[in-house]
Amino acid sequence: MRRTLVTYVKPHVQEDPLSMILGLGYLGGMLEREGIPVELVDERIGDDRAMMDAIERNDVIGFSALTPNIRRAIAWAKYAKQHGKITIMGGPHASVDQGVFLESGHFDFVLKGEGDYTLPQFLKAYEGADEAALEAIPGLAAMREGEMWIDNPAPPLIKKLDELPFPARHLLPMESYFKNNPEHLVYIFSTRGCPFKCIFCQKELTGRGFRVRSTEAIVDELEHIIQSYDPGVIAFVDEILTLRKKRIHEMCDEILRRGLKFEWIANTRADCVDYPLLKHMHRAGCRRIYYGWESGSQRMLDVLKKDLTPEAIVRAAKMTRRAGIWAKVYIIVGSPGETPDDIAETEKVLKLAGPDLIRISVFNPLIGTESWDNYQASIDMEDLSENYVSSNRSGYVHEHFSQVELEELRKNMVRSYERWYYSMPQRVRRLYERAIYYAENPRYGKKRLGRALGLVPPPKRHVVTNHH
C-alpha cells in the first residue's frame, strides 16, 4: 500500500496558540483504522527541509490549507509533482473553489466535503487502479488532458460522529506543540456545523446543520486526553458549543461525576448562554469563553446577518464575568457600509461589556460565502490574486476607508481598548467583581487565597512524548 502524507500548510501569520490541527488528526485516525500507512505533518513545526523530506518519503501527498495560504499549498504541490508524487487537496477552500488547485497543474485530485470516509475510499481505489471506483467517490474532482474528468458533488454530511475514531494525536508532534505553547493546549470537537447565517462564514465543509457527539463519547475522549497528554487546558473548537444547553449540562454533569479535573475553553454566541449554564460550566472546569460578537452596531450586526443585538452581547458578558469565566471576543471592522459612527458604537458596547481580550479582523469576503456573492463588484480581484487575505487586510474595496486606514483603525481600537481595560478604574472594578464572585462561591475564594499565600501548590506539568 502506498504511503500517504497528510499535511497542513503553514499560515503566513500564526495568530492562535500553537496546537494540533484536529482535521489532520481525524484523517490520520481513520486511515490507521483502515490499515493505510499514514504520516501526518504540520508545517508549522519544523522547516522547509523537513517538509521536503516528508514529501520525498511518501507516495500520495494530501494537503490542507486555510484560504490565505492556498498559494503556499500550490507551491508545495509543485515540489511534490517534481518528485513524482500523487497530489490531492481537501478542506474548506477546496470544497468551494476546486479550480484554483486543478487548474494550477500541480494537483491530481481535489476532495470536496468531509474526507473522513472518502479519503480512505480514494486511496484504496487509486491503489487498485480502479477507475470505476474512483469515478464514483463522492466529492472527488480531477482533470484529464485539460478537461474535467471527475466532478462529483460532496458527500452527505456525516451524521453519526460517534462512529469516527478519536483524532490520531500520537501521529502529531505533541511534545513540539507543548514546547511552543506553555499552556499545553489540546483541541477537541464535540459537534460539527452551525445553523446560523453569518455572511462571512464558509459552510461547505461542515454545513449549516448541527451534528453532535454523545456525552459519553465526548467525555471518554476528554479522559483519554487527560490520561495521555496531561494538558494545561483543553479547547472545544466547536463553532457554537452551547447551542443546545441541555447537552452541555449533561456533559458538565458527566465531567463532575467522573471527577475529571482540567481547565477548558468554549467557543459560542452571546445569545446561547444563560447564568445557570455558565455557573455549571465553571464548576466543570470552564475558565474561558470565546465569543464572536463582530460588532456593537446593530446596523452592522444586521449587515453581517449575525441575528444578534448589542443588548444580548452586554448581557452575556456580564453573566460570564459573574460566573467567574474570562472572555475573549472577536470583532470585524470594515464591514460593507460601516462608518465612523458604527465604529464608535462598537467601542461603546465593548466598554459596557468589558471583555478581557479583543481580537479585531478586517472584513473579508471569502469565496463560497454570501459576502463573496453579494459584494463581488467591490472586490479587487487583482489584489486578491496577488495577496489573498489575512486578518489585517482584505481585497474588499471599502466605501469609507482605505486599506491603510482600516489597518490603522484596527490597531488603534485594540490599543484604545487595552488602555481602558488596564486603567486604574477598571482594575478596581474587576477587583470588586472578583470579590463579589468569591463571596458567592467561597470554595473558589479559599483556593485562590491559598494559592496567593503559597498554601495551595499550582498544578504540575509533566513531560509528554508521542505514544506510537
Image (tube, rainbow, N blue to C red):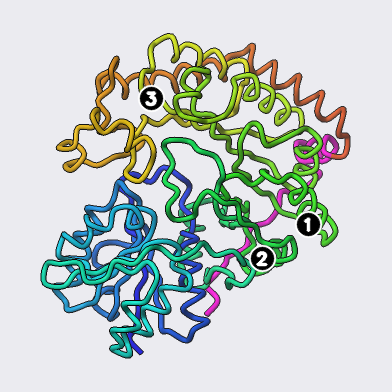
Q: Amino acid at mark 3?
A: Ser
Tell me the tag on residue 255.
1
The residue positioned farthest toward the top in the image shown: 341
Mark 3 sits on what residue?
Answer: 335
Q: Amino acid at mark 2?
A: Glu
Q: Amino acid at mark 1?
A: Ile
Residue 77, image x, y percentages = 21, 65
Mark 1–mark 3 Cα distance, whole angstroms, equals: 40 Å
Q: Which numbered disc, 2 or 1, marks the residue that appears first in the sequence? A: 2
Instruction: Look at the numbered disc 3 and give the secondary structure of its residue.
Output: loop
Instruction: Look at the numbered disc 2 and give the secondary structure of its residue.
Output: helix
Segment tinted magenta in the rendering: 444-468
Residue at figure coordinates x 75%, y 51% from the top left:
247
The residue positioned farthest toward the left in the image shown: 145
Instruction: Look at the numbered disc 1 and give the secondary structure of its residue.
Output: helix
Q: Which numbered disc, 3 or 2, marks the residue that appears first in the sequence? A: 2
Q: Is residue 63 above or below residue 32?
A: above
Residue at figure coordinates x 29%, y 80% from the top left:
58
Mark 2 sits on what residue?
Answer: 221
